[in-house]
Image (spheres, helix red, strand yellow):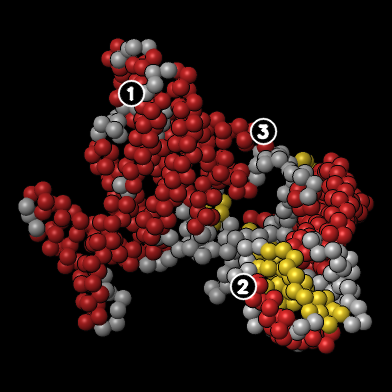
Amino acid sequence: MSIVTMEHVSFVVVQQEYSALLMRLMHLGCVELHTAAIESVPPLALRSEEGELSRAQQEYQLLIQATEDLRQIGGVRAPLLQKRREVAEKRMWNEGELHKALRLAEEIRRHAEAVEHARRGLAKREELCAALIHWTPLDLPLAGADTEYTQVVLQTLPVKINWKRLQEAVQEDAPESVLVEVSRTRERRYAALLCHRVSTGEALRALAHVGGRSASLGEYRRTARQEIEQARREQEELRGVIAQNTQQLRDLGAQRPVLELALDQARTRLALEEARALGLSDGTVVLLEGWMPVQHQDALEKVLQDFACAVQERPPQQTEQPPTLLRNPKWMRPINVVTEMYSLPDYRGIDPNPLIFWFYIFFFGFMFADVAYGLILTAVAAFVRKKWDPQGTLGQLMGLGVYLGLSTFVCGLLTGGFFGNAIEVVAGTFFGRSLQELPLWVQRFSAGFVFSPLTAPMTVLYTTLIIGVIQLLFGQFVHIYMEARNGHPWDGLLDTAPWWVFFAGIALWLLRGSAWLFLIGVLLLVLTQGRKRKSLGGKLAGGLASLYSVTNWLSDVLSYSRLMALMLATSVIATVINTLGALPGSLIAFIPVFLIGHLFNIAVNLIGTYVHAARLQYLEFYGRFYKEGGVPFRPLSYRTKYTQVRKEETL
């Protein structure tokens, strides 16, 4: 239960064997590669080994786009959860299957592009119809209606004008002209100006005075009605193209498993090409560096025996930042997701997961305490793990969900929650029996074997504060251990022990009225907390300033009262739901209210409880000792989404 010790490894391999070595390293899956830092070699002597990185990226993006086309256009969606297919390792490098899938992806892309082009055409013609609809009463071509002596100009005008006066003004400025209203809307008038060519300028100036604008319709040689009819016919043809290609995509959706396998194959090839690009070559040999867990040293050396390759291994230097890899028992690994949501620990820090495992699970169960809710949470998480075996973050969440459900179940037994007070409500409303008439064990359970949050809220509050003090003290002990591990044992003790004396003095003062221990605690804080400053005045000032930190301690302890708040929220909402369902006195009315209400209560408080249980770790507990900022360990390995690679002895 620790952070895995890393070793820095440097490779020098002959050019011809570089690709084969990378494949074996991917098979091994324990080496994170990066570009070699060779300062003594002239820059022009080495070049990056890019290989076919660009092609691998294009193939991967094509497959991604094809999958997205099937989803968005063809309506072919992958299940929300699906179990990974097991695939032999050699199949991940099958060129024939990948090329077949790429041809399929290209076909999907052609159909998708046809749909996208047709949709753009539909939108364009819809815009055309919207623009021409106001001109349909005009039985003249929108362009080309001019003659040798006359000209037709289409105009849009504000609707709030005196139309008759405008016609008169146009007649005065251009006697050989006629202004005809074609149509109008709430905002604009659409008009046609027919005039002699010599009078066009005067007529347009008259219209410009009232906000007239020429309609740009010179590309349309037919009437507006004819143009719209043609656009509607073209729209029908385009809809047919869309329907035909969409159906083709739906039919191709049956081959989605082929695309999924190819996606993992392409992702594997892309990872290999990205790793290849990290190597520096002079045309004869390739230089490469990386990080490796120390326990895999023998396995790596065994692999390298088959290659003309030199390797150098060394511990990390103080100036280097190795990646962080956490090593915990399999049953404890689900808690990693909580820490990873915050930040991985620094490589030279401490793995907090074993320290928060029991705290986090207990806090969650304490806040969510309900026997029925715990059983539901455990059953759902266990079912998802059994049926789909999710990997990664979702797999960790489901594994953690089993523990959280069990904790909720146990805490529900201790506090008497079963869908809130459902036993009491159902017995009293539908069976006419009070709680006192039920078996003794039911009475004891309903009252809470330890306490009930609804009848003893202050007991719950005191319990949460005691829990908070215990965890904060535990965090201080971890701080002492880390300082001692780093060679500073006195710093760890001086950072924490004076505070113990100080708070013990407060307790003694309140209980017995004696302040001597409190004064000793104040003196110790003043003398020790500013010790790292250089001057004597600075040391005393730092010690005095540390007394203000008592407010931080009190706020941290009071933060644990959220355990009570969330427990009460879950219980009170459940009680309200049961009461509302029982108000009509009908079982038929009670059941839907009961089911919907408790489903809502589980969903809302599940999120809140998960977040607040994590918050207590992040802010209150981690603040005592945690050093974050770790870089995750990313070895060259098979990172698949749809398949589970079954590794073989030889590739």
Residue 164: % across, % down: 66, 72
> Which numbered dot is residue 162?
2
Front in this rendered view, residue 547 or 593: 593
Residue 224: % across, % down: 83, 63
Disc 3 residue type (three-letter): Lys
Q: Which residue is mark 1?
A: 446
Residue 113: name its quadrant.
bottom right
Front in this rendered view, residue 422 or 613: 422
Q: Which secondary structure, mark 3? A: helix
Is residue 102 something that shows in the picture?
A: no
Identify the residue at horizontal 29%, vertical 82% (top origin).
Answer: 534
Front in this rendered view, residue 623 or 538: 623
Q: Nearer the viewer, mark 1 or mark 3?
A: 1
Query: Crowding at label 1, few (<14), some or many (≥20) Cα neighbours within 10 Å?
Result: many
Residue 370: % across, % down: 41, 31
Q: Which secondary structure, mark 2? A: loop
Gap between marks 1 and 3, in whole Å?
35 Å
Gap between marks 2 and 3, in whole Å?
76 Å
Left or right: residue 489 versus residue 356 is: left
Identify the residue at horizontal 27%, vertical 15% (top origin).
Answer: 436
Disc 2 residue type (three-letter): Asn
Q: Which residue is mark 3?
A: 387
* Residue 229 position (above or below residue 315): above
Identify the residue at horizontal 43%, vertical 66% (top origin).
Answer: 486
Q: Which secondary structure, mark 1? A: helix
Q: Earlier in the sequence, mark 1 or mark 3?
A: 3
Q: Earlier in the sequence, mark 2 or mark 1?
A: 2
Residue 214: name its quadrant.
bottom right
Left or right: residue 232 versus residue 503 is: right
Gap between marks 2 and 1, in whole Å?
83 Å
Is residue 136 something that shows in the picture?
A: yes
* Residue 559 position (above or below residue 127): above
